[in-house]
Image: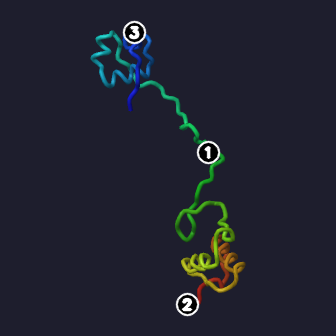
Amino acid sequence: MSMEIPQEKLDNPELLTEAEIWYLWTRTPNKLLALGVEAPTAPPEVPEAAPAGTKVTPLEEQQVPTIATKGGIVDDAEEDYEEGWNNNQRRAELTRRGLSIDGNKDELIARLRRSDTDTLEDDDHSKV
């Protein structure tokens, strides 16, 4: 990372900021010594700021993912098996979980949701 320091400040070291002194000291300490600038005792304090355009969510409002009983990290939010899913995708997910793929759309969705909440029924398991 480079820093542009105006020549005016280099000619008048008393105009240098802490950050500029630290920057120059880490690169050309002999030059600063020749100008009569004392060695900095510590790096300058840099305020913690988020990059421009970054939305910062307070810790209290953040959701923490949890470990599902079947393994893997899942969000606390319930999966929406209706929007963006077709029956082939629902059946593939049920097969992956070792569950029955029989039934209509509503039955498949209900079985997936029961699986998510560990409330499976006896007939939910695959008969293979």
Q: Which mark, by number, is residue 99? A: none
Number of residues whose C-alpha sits closer than 10 Å to that of mark 3, classed few (under 14), some (14–19) or many (20 or more): few
Q: Nearer the viewer, residue 101 or 113?
A: 101
Query: CB under 8 Å between callouts 1 and 2?
Result: no
In this rendering, the label closer to the viewer, 1 or 3: 3
Residue 104: give x, y in percent of width and height.
70, 83
**Which SS class for mark 2?**
loop
In this rendering, the label closer to the viewer, 2 or 3: 3
* Badge 1 or badge 2: first in the primary sequence: 1
Q: Nearer the viewer, residue 85 or 39?
A: 85
Quadrant placement of the C terminus: bottom right
61 relative to 36 in the view: left or right: right
Residue 37: give x, y in percent of width and height.
35, 12
**Which residue carries the number 3 mark?**
12
- In the image, what residue occupies the spot 58% across and 76% down? 93
Q: Is residue 31 above or below residue 56?
A: above
The Cα–Cα distance between marks 1 and 2, rounded to whole angstroms, is 46 Å
The Cα–Cα distance between marks 1 and 3, rounded to whole angstroms, is 45 Å
Residue extending farthest to the left is 30
**Which residue carries the number 2 mark?**
128
On the image, which quarter does residue 13 sit in? top left
Residue type, numbered disc 1: Leu
1 relative to 99 in the view: left or right: left
* Badge 1 or badge 3: first in the primary sequence: 3
51 relative to 77 in the view: left or right: left
* Badge 2 or badge 3: first in the primary sequence: 3
**Which residue carries the number 1 mark?**
59
